[in-house]
Amino acid sequence: MIVVMKVDSGQKEIDDILKRLAEEGLTGHLSKGMERTVIGVVGQAYPELRDMLELLPGVAEVIPITKPYKLSSREFQPQDTVIKVGDLAIGGEELVVIAGPCAVESEEQVLETARAVKAAGANILRGGAFKPSTSPYGFRGLGEEGLKILAQAREETGLPIITEVLGPKEVDLVLRYADILQVGARNMQNFVLLDEVGKANKPVMLKRGMSATIQEWLLSAEYILSQGNRQLMLCERGIRTFETYTRNTMDVSAIPIIEKVSHLPIIADPSHSTGKWYLVAPLALAAVAAGADGLMIEVHPSPDHALKDGAQSLTFDNFQRLMAQLVGVVASLGRKMAGGTNG
């Protein structure tokens, strides 16, 4: 349930409610909007709680939340969450583009890619230093050396970096280098990891699990939000279906669904969704038309030599063409490209 405060309620009334909830073994999460202030009640509520809370000073009404996810719902927070990363605003009117290689392979590869994607208009650099691999014999990343290379690229280009964290033990290490923590599809229900990134003081991007329903995805988001980290964005990266022609099936419908039921920003990853480079641009354009707040695109200087996911990576020229196409689509929707990209 959520407690809606009166317009003229003050901090004392809010503090009293939070204290009372704590006495009942519950947790209160505060959300201050332009029109109202609400307190989300997290925990096992009992039927009489609603009546008790409505008696407290400053309370306008108490509304039961019908969905199993609370903090990520529009009922808890009607206004969109906007995440600030430097001068970027993720979740606002501007489209944010994240680009870079699947995996950090070398200093030369990352720096060359960072320069190219920035010149084309990308806003954030992606690259995996720790890589989950279906096979134990596949490339599993350079570890901290890869993080240092990403940090070097940020220093040279000014691009913030996003990189994946695989387990709870790596969170502190990745936090020292990354601007945004990525929780991958395979870890969407790694609840210990979700708790740890929920305690972090940096933005997190949570990818949808390959077989996860939207409700399961939002419940995983709830783990992060319930630990206090409100800088959370979601990423649709395709789900596993019976179709074998593509690597995954991109669920474009998930984008407007998330925007309807949740206040969290939604990013689309057409690279992992399709697994084929020539499908990336069409699906990227479709995702933007569907309302995505951002795109995550894999780019590599020589995809045929990539250690990971070369088949779905764009060359520099193909990425530049995609960025030019995006300008027109974004303008037709009355939006802008982040960073003032004009194609």
Image: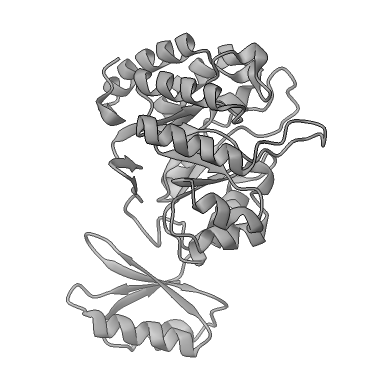
What x and y, as percent, mark residue 291?
Answer: 40, 33
Residue 297 seen in render: no
Residue in the image at 53% along x and 79% along y = 45
Closest to the observer, 34 or 277: 277
Residue 144 horizontal/vertical position (percent): 60, 44
Residue beneath the point at 55% across and 57% down = 172
Residue at horizontal 43 percent and vertical 81 percent from the top: 50
Give the position of the N terminus as an image quadrant: bottom left
- State the residue in front, 143 or 265: 143
Task: Give x and y (percent) for residue 173.
Answer: 57, 53
Q: Residue sitting at 75 percent across and 21 percent down?
A: 244
Taking depth in this image into account, of 91 and 319 the one nearest to the observer is: 319
Position of 19 relative to 132 (above/below): below
Can residue 264 be seen at all in this image of the molecule? yes
- The image shows residue 144, relative to residue 272, as above or below, that is below
Of 259 and 18, nearer the camera is 18
